[in-house]
Image (tube, rainbow, N blue to C red):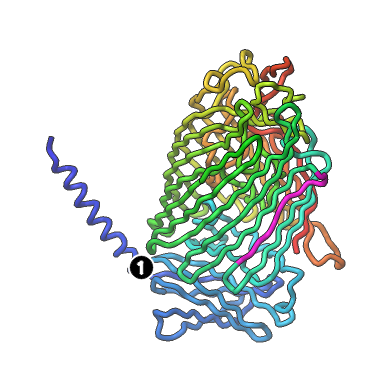
Amino acid sequence: MNPRPAWISMVLLGVLSAALPAYAAGRPGKIAGTVRDSAGVPQMGAAIEVHSAGLTAALLTFTDAHGRYSVKELPVGRYQVKVSQTSFLPTLRENVSLRPGAEVIVNLTLNTLFEALQVLPMRGRTADDQDDWKWTLRSMASRPILRVLDDGPVVVVSSNSPEGDRHALKARVEFLAGSTSEAFGSGPTGATSFRLERSLFSSGTLSFGGHVGSGFDEPAVLRAAYSHQFSSGERPEVAITVRRFATQGIDNNRAPLQALAVTFTNQTRLADFAELQYGSEYQSIQFLGRAAALRPFGTLDLHLSPNTVVEYRYSTLTPNLRPEKGFDSAPADLSESGPRVSLIARAPYLESPHHQEVSISRRVGKSNFQLAGFADRLSHAALLGLGDNPADDASGAVLADPFSQNFTYNGGNFTAHGVRAVAQHKFAPALTGTLDVAYGDALTLRSPSLFVLGSTPPELAFSAARQASVAAKLSGHIPVSKTSWIASYKWHSGGHSLTPVDAYNVSAGEADPFFNLFIRQPLPSGSFLPGQMEALVDIRNLLAQGYIPVIGRDGHTLYLVQSARSIRGGVAFNF
């Protein structure tokens, strides 16, 4: 065997590793953006000062007739951007990180002294802000990697902080009601969700939120979190989430299931072209015994150019993609809140996923493309089921919800691997389309007619099968009525699949199974309310597809499903 090819490859790899950072470090960058007042009106003639430790003097420029500014030929580093205008208080944006060759968008808002003293109401987002189109490879913090704006510049680094007053108190309250017996945990009495957020010490953010039902025994979720932005670019966050669910899993026992999750996340920059996000979550439940697990996760992004990103992602958590809609539409239930729990012989088990993925994403004009390969390993899969009296089972294998006719069932263990291709295009300022094609393994039921719930062992009842899925999604907004909407349909090639193909997809092509529709409509609130009011409609699996009939131990017909049909709606107030 001739070792020369391997030796030559090692030398070339070392040369490229040393040359690429040196080449990238020499390319200047650009900071640009728009200056508006609190009403969203562009400000002409505002003075823009760009400061940096690497500059001998501040760079000065002025906004044009459309409130836009641009500072070019900037070396790599950290900058402060200050805007001043007659009749307004100065506004300062700190810790603006500029990579080699990158174009960073920094939009600034000017406030009067009277507006700065007000805490409520919070300024709403302008139509131009809503037109920003994000191509998102969502990691655990759901941060954008590439963002496309109407005028074409690319933002490679974006802050998690809002564009307006960072010290303002933000509040949101939602009153939601769901269809009965169709969505796990959504009863006719409805529920209330709330979230409060406040900036502390100019670089910290404290948030508190939750979801509570209207009845004494109904589910409840409370979450408190604190994050801090350091000048180095690191942003650690710690969060504590407490959940309480009434159950009816064994012999009509309604002992509550109590869950605790402590989550730590952080993001840091390893180099000018490399970013790392990492963290872990400790999960613990108390129900018919105790179960606990530590769930690490991490994401490494390599920015090969302003338009190309290579990413490696590892996760042991089920991703939460509901914030894409702008609010957490899920009820406080066991099917959509972690940790996912199921039973085997009256003992609780936590669903344990292990997901690895390598992807490359490329922006071309107003289109974005992604190719990815993934490998999954899932232990104690918590499957969703529907039917009458599912808790009437002596095997201790059914964890039922007393507020609906739904339950979770242990689907055992399986492994999956496959590939994904995503294409996204902005057809118009108010219309974006996404196509997601995946091929890989999904958990399927071997023989539905021979399966008896609670009697057939998981290793004999379920198996992994190669399948394909195609998801098409359209999203946009109507400028006249300010209506935001998302419509999607996800098709699966297998008729007996219980889990989606590529179940841990967090790209822009991710979609719930089958037909779904989401609508947000601002409502006139009048002068007597300090905030903004919205009507919300969230419809999932409207056509009730993917229902697989099985037989319960008492002879009744039950169903195992990927996604239950549900219709949820309500009113939300933003302060």
Task: Farthest residue to the front: give it.
Answer: 289
Q: Could you tell me residue 226's position as x and y percent?
A: 60, 62
Position above or below: 39 against 423: below
Query: Considering the image in quadrants, where does the N terminus appear?
Result: top left
Q: Residue at x 57, y 27 (%)?
A: 411
Q: Position of residue 392 (x, y in %)?
A: 74, 23
Q: Nearer the viewer, residue 25 or 256?
A: 256
- Residue 495 lies in magenta, yes or no? no
Amino acid type, label 1: Arg
Can the viewer see residue 467? yes
Pick the front one: 132 or 163:
163
Q: Is residue 429 above or below residue 92?
A: above
Q: What main secondary structure does the magenta stretch of the protein show?
A: strand
Mark 1 lies on residue? 27
Q: Position of residue 372 (x, y in %)?
A: 44, 42
Few, some or many C-alpha atoms within 10 Å of disc 1 (few <14, some 14-19, many ≥20)? Answer: some
| Image position of 130 with respect to 325: above or below | below
Task: Identify which residue is drawn at 51% across, 46% down.
Answer: 295
Look at 42% across and 48% down and name the residue there. 312
Q: Is residue 535 visible?
A: no
In percent of width and height, residue 34 lies at 58, 71
Residue 207 sits inside the magenta stretch: yes
> For numbered disc 1, what is the local secondary structure?
loop
| Magenta highlight range | 205-216
